[in-house]
Amino acid sequence: MAALTRTGITYYLTTEKVNGKPVGIRITVQATVHKEHTFIKERVLDYTPSVKHRLLQHEQRHFDISEIFARLAARKLQILKLTQNYQKEIAHFVNEKFKAAEAYHHLYDSDTQNGEDFAAQDEWDDKIAARLMELDRYKKKVVVRRLGK
């Protein structure tokens, strides 16, 4: 392994209260890179420019996959049925999206042989780019919901 990019999905929840009672929420979902678990080995510096570029592009797609799942989460959070236990429901939902993203990352690495199968990598590049475009309207990933209705 010449490089590793560890990504994830995080969210921030803000609750609006009136007289101590929750009346609205704002959920911000983000794709993240975990810097402490992301690296490129020093030997990569000796690679040809084209090989370095392909390696970095493969790693970029890992972030893009997390971005896809963050956008999917934001889309679904707009309509997800929430109860008075909304904090736990949102945490559970985002955790499920994270698990789905992890499975997708594994499939991506397996199909592309960690970026070494150039034809498969090109197919995945196109697939990921198309999915990001399909979900473009959710790229802000901020959901505002009223509660109690």
Image (cartoon, rainbow, N blue to C red):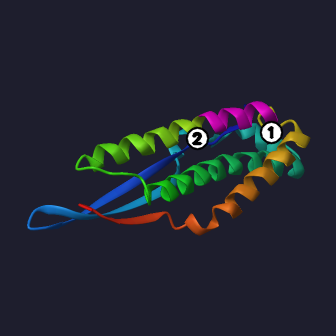
Give the magenta-colored segment's residue range: 103-112
* Quadrant of image for the N terminus: top right
Select label 1 or label 2 by which is in front.
2
User: Closer to the camera, 140 or 83?
Assistant: 83
Question: What residue did someone put label 1 on?
Answer: 115
Asked whether, in this view, residue 52 is left or right of residue 94, the answer is: right
Q: Which mark is residue 101?
A: 2
Element type at mark 2: helix
Residue 121 image-quadrant placement: top right
Q: Residue furthest front?
A: 149
User: Closer to the camera, 31 or 48?
Assistant: 31
Q: Residue at x 8, y 67 (%)?
A: 19
The three-letter code of the residue at mark 2 reads: Ala
Mark pair 1, 2: CA separation: 18 Å
Whether residue 51 appears in this view of the structure is yes
Q: Residue furthest right?
A: 119
- Label the magenta part by its dominant secondary structure: helix
Q: Give the percent coordinates (x, y) of residue 144.
A: 37, 67
Q: Is residue 111 magenta?
A: yes
Asked whether, in this view, residue 53 is left or right of residue 74, the answer is: right
Q: Which mark is residue 53?
A: none
